[in-house]
Structures are given as C-alpha cells and as structure tokens.
Amino acid sequence: MSGTPSTRERLIATAARLFQERGYAATGLNDVLAQAGAPKGSLYHHFPDGKEGLAVAAALMAGERFLATIHKDAGDSADSADMLIRFAARLAGWLEQSGFRLGCPVATLTLEQAAVSQNLATTFSAVFSSWQDALAQRLQADGVGAARSQALAQLALGAIEGSLILARAQRSTAPLTQTAETLAGIFASEAGARACTHKGFGRDA
C-alpha cells in the first residue's frame, strides 16, 4: 500500500498539473508551493535548478503516466487499430472532464520552452520518443516491420497531438475522434497487408 506522497512528489505532481493547465511562464513557483502544501525553501532543496529542474521532473512524471496508459490500452486491445480507438476515447474523456482546459501534459511545455532550454528540449524529446516507441511496438505485434512501425507511430503521435489542439480550440472531441478513426484505418490496412504478404491471407481494412 502506497504511503503519503513526499514533499518532492507533491511538488512534481502539482507543477505537472499547473504546467499542463497554464503553461510554463504563467505558472509561478509560489503557486506551486501553495497548492502542494509545501514549505518555502523546499523547492530549491529538492530542485537546485529551480523552475527548470521542476519542469524536467514534471515532464518525466507526466510522460511515465501517459506511457503507462498507452501500454495498458495496447495490452487490452485486439490490434493496433483497436488500440488507437481506445486511446483516443480515453483522451477525449479526459478533455471533456477538464472542460477542454487540459491537453497533452508535455505539449504546452514543449511549445514554450524547447527553443529556450536544451535541457528541457532533450527531456521532451525523450518523452515523445518513449510514446512513439510504445505505439511502434503495438504495430510490430501486428506484424508490421520495425522501420515502418516507427514511421506510422510518428505519424500517429503527430496527428493526435495536433487533434488535441484542435479539440481544445473547438471545444469538441470530434477532431480527436476523427483523427483516431483515420489512423485506425491506416493501421488496420498496414497490418492486413503484412498478414497477406507473410501468411497468404489478409483482413478487411
């Protein structure tokens, strides 16, 4: 049974939520401390690099949680196409529950800080790469080759990130749902073509 979150864990979780909702520039360290219920001075004790160090930790934590969700949906799905539909439905639910205030937990930070801090840019790149690799692994389980799986996973990740922005702008989950359906069709077609090539039969796309 997990215990009470430590001060460091509370700071990271609070910062991740505020960065996701407000962005990097609009999130003040005093707000993080207040909402985390942490004493003054604790932030620099745990994060000597200050706000940037906290942002790195927050991005990594959010990235791990998102990655765990991808792995769960991949494990629960019949194939990669089904996985895309499940994952998009989950994202759509989160969007609606937040009143379309919370999009990708890393995208806002990336747009603001990737060009400013090489340390943060490297962190964000690693997080996105882990998500792409997870999507590619699910495609490979359907028989799609490694290089092609990476290309399709990158396409899917970019399309989903873009559809999240459109969904927030339109205050509608339709862009996300439509993108997922299109991607699912591509994934199913690729998997079917591979099955036909290697086993002598295909599946409907």
Image (cartoon, rainbow, N blue to C red):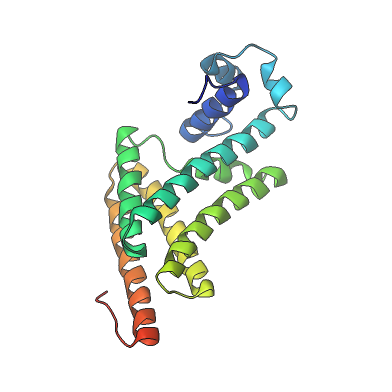
Residue 30 or 154: which is nearer the viewer? 154
Q: In which quarter of the image is residue 179?
A: bottom left
Residue 36 or 146: which is nearer the viewer? 146
Residue 85 or 22: which is nearer the viewer? 85
Residue 95 horizontal/vertical position (percent): 34, 39
In the orientation shown, which residue stands out farthest toward the front? 1
Left or right: where does residue 105 sit relative to residue 196?
right
Residue 126 horizontal/vertical position (percent): 62, 51
Residue 203 horizontal/vertical position (percent): 27, 77
In the orientation shown, which residue stands out farthest toward the top? 39
Q: Which residue: 40% across, 85% down?
A: 198
Where 54 sits versus 84, above or below? above
Where 26 sits versus 172, above or below? above
Total numbered labels: 0
Q: Can residue 160 be seen by looking at this rendering?
A: yes
In the orientation shown, which residue stands out farthest toward the left? 204
Where 72 sits versus 49, above or below? below
In the orientation shown, which residue stands out farthest toward the right? 48
Left or right: where does residue 147 sit relative to residue 84?
right
Q: Which residue: 39% across, 54% down?
A: 75
Q: Can residue 26 be seen by looking at this rendering?
A: no
Q: Which residue: 64% across, 31% down?
A: 54
Residue 20 or 67: which is nearer the viewer? 67
Q: Which residue: 30% across, 56% down?
A: 85
Q: Quarter of the image containing the C terminus?
A: bottom left
